[in-house]
Amino acid sequence: MTTPTFAGALTALVTPFRDGQVDVEALRALVEAQIAGGIDGLVPCGTTGESVTLSTAEHALVVRSVVEQARGRVPVVAGAGSVSTAHSIDLVRLARDAKADGVLIVVPYYNKPSQAGLVAHYRAVLSAVSMPTILYNIPGRTGVDLGLDAMAQLAEVPEIVAVKEATGNVVRSQALLARFGERFTILSGDDGLTLPILSVGGQGVISVTSNVLPREVSEVIRLWNAGDVAGARKLHLRLVPVHESMFVESNPGPVKAALARWGRLAPEVRLPLVWPAAASQKLTMDALDAAGFAPTTPGTSGPRVTAS
């Protein structure tokens, strides 16, 4: 198995809908905007992609469309997590058949498995279908925290190459790096913690904000990697209010509202989510405006900076 490198800024892609159906045209345009904006990878069918509301056929359509549109220019890591080990195996197989470069497998949610159960789950999935894998630990959504001792056992699974660390605590990233060194690539699962996680040895972010601002989110990491700590910090801090505004209501409502404002997709999310309230939309738009980001004219690759 060839192991790709998943690092830098990867976008947790939204799934555009129109009249209740996946809007493939808008999805493909979004992929182009991301690549033109300098993003380092694409992650369809994760939390931000409303994966739990997609049918299997829709899931396959989204992954296939993103892979086809990306045309190998950046890696595509398809979401493949589920409450069911058998279903996760099916989703990993789907990603493999679509020629994705890897999979993102969230800790099983709702059924609250033990640490032993989590280890058994990942081993079973990757024994059935071998794919380069990013583990996704987000206890605030799953109700289960994948602990360090379980990670030590999973370090024996060669397919697991990275961790999307979304505990909201940079100390966890620090502990992973201290214990496992370079065994896993650590990616921030929270836009607001990207720079702190880079500072302790992380290598990137799986970002919500980059759906709207791929160039700016990517630039923080490029500045850091180039040794321009002051420049990375300045841009990161400028983005912090924007990052915070993306979660004024449940993701992906606010980021979809921003994209809809700029004509990138129809204003739709799937139940049980509802479109963000007017006050929430205003908060998100005000944060973007205050930070100096404005929409481009139709046909251009992405938002541009209009004020320093």
Image (tube, helix red, strand yellow):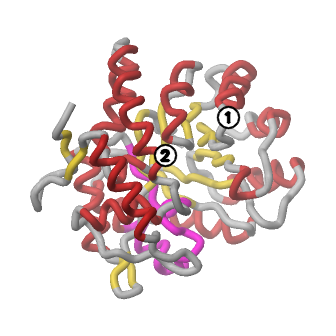
Q: Nearer the viewer, mark 1 or mark 2?
A: 2
- Residue 131, percent from left and from top: 57, 51
Instruction: Examine the rendered structure and indicate whether residue 60 appears above or below residue 29.
Output: below
Q: Is mark 1 on a helix, strand or loop?
A: loop
For the C terminus, give its image quadrant. top left
Q: Are marks 1 and 2 in contact (CB under 8 Å)?
A: no
Q: How many residues crowd around disc 2 within 10 Å: few (fewer than 14), some, or many (20 or more)?
A: some
Sequence-wise, the earlier of marks 1 and 2 is 1
The residue labelled by disc 2 is 244
Question: CA gap, disc 1 to disc 2?
Answer: 15 Å
Residue 175 in the figure: left or right of residue 242:
right
Residue 208 can be seen, yes or no: yes
Instruction: Examine the rendered structure and indicate whether residue 193 appears above or below residue 227.
Output: below
The residue labelled by disc 1 is 169
- Residue 195, percent from left and from top: 49, 27
Q: Name the residue at 36% across, 59% down.
A: 67
Q: What stretch is highlighted in magenta?
A: 41-64
Identity, as a three-letter code, of the amino acid under mark 1: Asn
Q: Name the residue at 38% across, 37% down.
A: 239
Q: Is residue 55 magenta?
A: yes
Q: Which of 83 and 205 is in front in this view?
A: 205
The picture quadrant where one finds residue 223 is top left
Identity, as a three-letter code, of the amino acid under mark 2: Glu
Residue 76 can be seen, yes or no: no
